[in-house]
Amino acid sequence: MGNVLGIINTINEKPFLKELTQHRSMASVPFAGRYRLIDFTLSNFIHASITKVGVATKDKYRSIMDHLGSGKEWDLDRRNGGLFILPPVHPDEKLQGDLQHFYDHLEFFQRSDEDTVIISPGHHVNKIDFNDVVAKHKTERADITVVCKNYHGKPVEKPIYHTCTCDTEGTVTDIELYTSPVHGEHVCLETFVINKNLLIDLIIKCVENDEYDLIKDAVKANLHTLRVKAYHFTGEMPFIHSVDSFYSGNMSFLDPKIVRSFFYDSWDLYTKVKHEAPVNYGLLSKTSNSLIANGCEIEGIVEDSIIFRGVKIHPGAVVKNSIIMQKGEIGAGAYIENVIMDKQAIITKETVVVGAESHPKVIKKAEIM
């Protein structure tokens, strides 16, 4: 599939992950042992042969730039097209919304040769086949296609999702903003396919009328004047809207069914390559049902956990039901359970840290306990 521009929209990110997004955007939060959340959307774009991608950022985007680099790992370091970071034009001013950001980068859209645009968040964990989405968009002669998914999982405490109502022909008739969806409701994944010239017209029209929100002002407000269709995504997707759901979403990757869905039954998932030695397991180490990345030194016990690259677990240490991010260290004789450790955090020897499975304990980046 050619002639499509991909936009990763991080403008509407909310501080769902608290300490984990204190120094980084949600899109660049580590996930599943070796990835960042943004890798999923980027890999979906690459599978659809999208060769020009813009990443709209508002703040704390250094980690995104460091992770993406030239875009080489996603085959986006190219002469024509490639990867473009779209930073804030006025970083000292409060950004009104994503349409304001797009307006500030209007020339990027106008100078793009592609006639179709896909806009998608950078923090969703899924394998959406955009070849299929765009084909349906064109077959149904839609102006806008909204990607939806039936909600599953625990009730959402805060009204943070948008839900779609569709008629029998798949036309979106209403979008309810900021709701707490119940099981089976159609959640808008904030992923849209839209004709480029229409998008440019909507950006200009909305901003000139002091309207700055893509979903509310460009999509919902035009449901009765534009042909807006729904695409129902049925694949696996952990909904991440809190620290608790981030934890359970990570842990779902210990389920063989989820692993098969994301890594064996679909296209490749690309990320920044780190060349490190294989895991070094000590003579007294024991591991079970865990994801352990390269560069780790395991001398203790690891059960039902996700261990990122370069982690050191000393003799006598026990790690259960936990997520240990890059370069973390667990001291000798320490015990941790139901914990999320950010990068470079250290648990000193004999220390005990236990959270609840429903409310894991978060240890900040480079924190020492």
Image: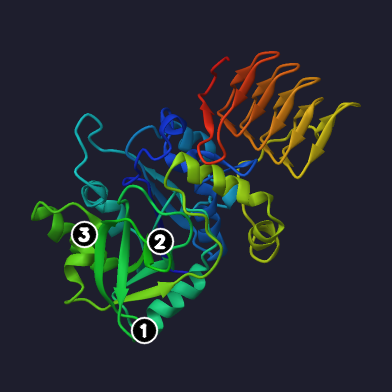
Q: Nearer the viewer, residue 355 or 52?
A: 355
Horizontal side of 114 relative to 173 (left or right) equals right
Q: Amino acid at mark 2?
A: Leu
Q: Residue furthest right?
A: 283
Q: Quadrant of the C terminus?
A: top right
Q: Nearer the viewer, mark 1 or mark 3?
A: 3
Q: Quadrant of residue 24?
A: top left
Query: Residue 109: horizontal and vertical position, in percent?
Result: 30, 57
Q: Helix, strand, or loop for circle 1?
A: loop
Q: Amino acid at mark 3?
A: Lys
Tag 2 residue: 5
In the figure, 128 relative to 34: above or below? Answer: below
Check residue 199 in the rendering and tell me which mark sits there, or answer none. none
Residue drawn at 51 percent across, 70 percent down: 234
Between discs 2 and 3, the one toward the N terminus: 2
Residue drawn at 40 percent across, 84 percent down: 139
Horizontal side of 54 relative to 100 (left or right) equals right
Tag 3 residue: 216
Between discs 2 and 1, the one toward the N terminus: 2
Q: Residue furthest left?
A: 209
In the figure, 168 relative to 10: above or below? Answer: below
> How are the colours assigned in the image?
rainbow
Label 3 packing within 10 angstroms: few (<14), some (14-19), many (20+): some
- CA gap, disc 2 and disc 1: 20 Å
Horizontal side of 218 relative to 185 (left or right) equals left
Label 2 packing within 10 angstroms: few (<14), some (14-19), many (20+): many
Q: Amino acid at mark 1?
A: Glu
Q: Is residue 114 visible?
A: no
Q: Helix, strand, or loop for circle 2?
A: strand
Check residue 140 in the rendering and tell me which mark sits there, or answer none. 1
Q: Helix, strand, or loop for circle 3?
A: helix
- CA gap, disc 1 and disc 3: 23 Å
